Image (tube, rainbow, N blue to C red):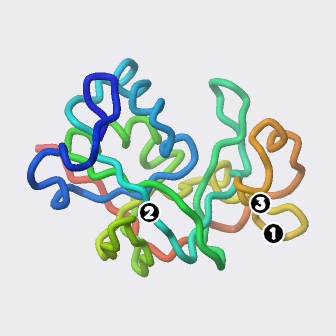
Amino acid sequence: MHVDGAGHPLGTAPDGWRERTAVLAYGSNANPSKITWLRARLGLEGPVVVAHARCAGLAAVWAAGFRVVDDQRPATLTALPGVEEHAVWFVTPAQLAVLDRCEGRGTRYHLARLTEPDITLDDGTRLTEVHTYVGAAPIRYPLLVDGKPVRTADVPQAEAAALDGVPADGHGVPCEVVTPACPD
């Protein structure tokens, strides 16, 4: 759990944290420094509960486009065989709204509910209701090099900008895009 600028044991998390919205985090969102950045830049508040997870059938891969702020290639998610280690944020509605702004929900990424999650926390809990962000436009679809996505685990970000390929036809994740609620 991240609060007051530091990490704390999960046992100190607020009651009911498992009932919050579970959001699979990969790429920079799995980095604890992102929480600090979100607090400083976008007003993220409250304890952020994050658990380590084993994800089967999903992979963080390099996106086809670049970030405007630093010309780096961001990560995106797609379905691929194998197992990867990622994080799951358990967020409040207000924290989810901050993530939506950061991810450019509806333009760069869509918030989606995974329809076939195979995600298990370190304590053995298997999650059945998991959301994540998937590419919403070709610049955030997986980059295909020689017809295949490139896992972030295989190519460091410093080398990812030099990859040459084409965007996939879509994000490739078995999911349902979550339509934002209409404002009152």
* Three-letter residue code for mark 1: Lys
Residue bearing the label numbered 1? 148
Q: Which residue sits at x=84%, y=41%? A: 159
User: Where is 84 relative to 92, above or below?
Assistant: below
* Three-letter residue code for mark 2: Ala
Q: Please, what secondary structure does the residue beneath circle 2 have?
A: strand
Q: Which comes before the other along the chain, label 2 or label 1? A: 2
Q: Nearer the viewer, residue 37 or 16?
A: 16
Q: Give the left or right position of residue 91, taking residue 152 as reference.
A: left
Q: Give the left or right position of residue 21, taking residue 39 as reference.
A: left
Locate residue 68, reporting x and y percent: 65, 28
Mark 2 against mark 1, which lies toward the viewer? 2
* Three-letter residue code for mark 3: Val
Locate residue 15, reporting x and y percent: 9, 51
The CA span between labels 2 and 3 is 21 Å
The CA span between labels 3 and 1 is 6 Å
Q: Which comes before the other along the chain, label 2 or label 3? A: 2
Q: Which residue sits at x=31%, y=76%? A: 128
User: Where is 128 relative to 89, above or below?
Assistant: below
The CA span between labels 2 and 1 is 25 Å
Q: Nearer the viewer, residue 161 or 56?
A: 56
Residue bearing the label numbered 3? 150
Residue bearing the label numbered 2? 53
Task: Quadrant for the C terminus, please.
Answer: top left
